[in-house]
Amino acid sequence: MKVYITRPPAYASSPDHVVRVLVDAPKQRVGVEMCIVFSPNPSEPVPDDGSVVQSGDKFYKVIAASEFDYELLKRSTGWADRQAWHLTFRWDARSFTDPIPLYTYSMATKMSAPELSRTTYQNNLSVGFVVPFSDSAFEDCAVTVNINPDVNKGDCVVMGVNASEIERTDYSASAQVRELILLPGVQISAPTSCTPDGQVNVQVQVLDANDMPIEHDAEIFLEAVNGYLPKTRIKTVNGQASVPFMALGLVAGDSARVKAGFKYFSGASDVSIQIHD
């Protein structure tokens, strides 16, 4: 499992902290702990029960903990292709919220993760569990961590994965990691024109984060702006699918648009069709 660490410039003001991530592959869980800097009593030994984390020459105590439980998340209605679950840390309450399905929340408003954080939670979505596909295995998911942009006031300690699986990125937010590295897309194509009340085939192709065609299957959600689609949910085969578009009730000079996306990320790609005699 890959872990990506980012330092967003717009990160909210916060105390010196360490986020400790514990990947437990056998149990298919990712533990998350928020740790705040403190000064140990020099006359007493530093606790070795896991309640204290050392980063460099500083010590941090655990003040809150939560986790992503893969099997539990899979049973949620938010589980779908192209999803990301987030733990929000509330600095005022010194606690994590329950994991939220990010794209389920943002779909209705079309807000980005930072916008959702500022307007709804008024803090930072600090740790994410990214699910590329609904059939992704635990090890094929990924973790994203936002920490303070000041290297002297924030760090991340990761346990349970090889060092080669940890990437400290130059991206300004974990949203860029999701969109540019981890999550799939979809491409839709169709003939540029159709006759009134005629029919053309619309093609769908699943893409990786680099916009390259892949054979991984996903459930694609379709929407027609004018005209008619007899199928609005289709499952790809080897990454591809086809569905008829019908120009029912349309006349020469009209135009239609067909959009394709995922359950909680609609309209990822679209194509226009002109109606001609």
Image (cartoon, rainbow, N blue to C red):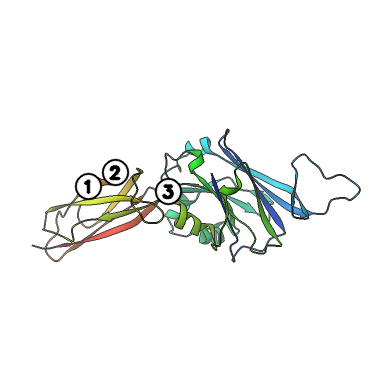
First in residue order: circle 2 vs circle 3: 3
Q: Are marks 1 and 3 in contact (CB under 8 Å)?
A: no
Q: Is residue 146 left or right of residue 133?
A: right
Residue placed furthest toward the left: 277
Q: Residue at x 46, y 54 (%)?
A: 181
Task: Return the residue nearer the eye: 213 or 256.
Answer: 213
Amino acid, disc 3: Arg
First in residue order: circle 2 vs circle 1: 2
Residue annotated with mark 2: 234
Dot 3 falls on a residue whose secondary structure is loop
Q: Is residue 232 left or right of residue 49?
A: left
Q: In the figure, 194 relative to 157: above or below?
A: below
Residue annotated with mark 3: 82
First in residue order: circle 1 vs circle 3: 3
Q: Residue at x 57, y 48 (%)?
A: 164
Few, some or many C-alpha atoms within 10 Å of disc 1 (few <14, some 14-19, many ≥20)?
A: some
Dot 1 falls on a residue whose secondary structure is strand
Few, some or many C-alpha atoms within 10 Å of disc 3 (few <14, some 14-19, many ≥20)?
A: many
Q: Are marks 2 and 3 in contact (CB under 8 Å)?
A: no
Q: Residue at x 33, y 51 (%)?
A: 213
Few, some or many C-alpha atoms within 10 Å of disc 2 (few <14, some 14-19, many ≥20)?
A: some
Residue 30: image location, x then y, percent: 59, 41
Amino acid, disc 1: Val
Amino acid, disc 2: Ile
Task: Return the residue nearer the eye: 270 or 205.
Answer: 205
| Cα separation between marks 1 and 3 | 21 Å
Report the disc number at residue 243: 1
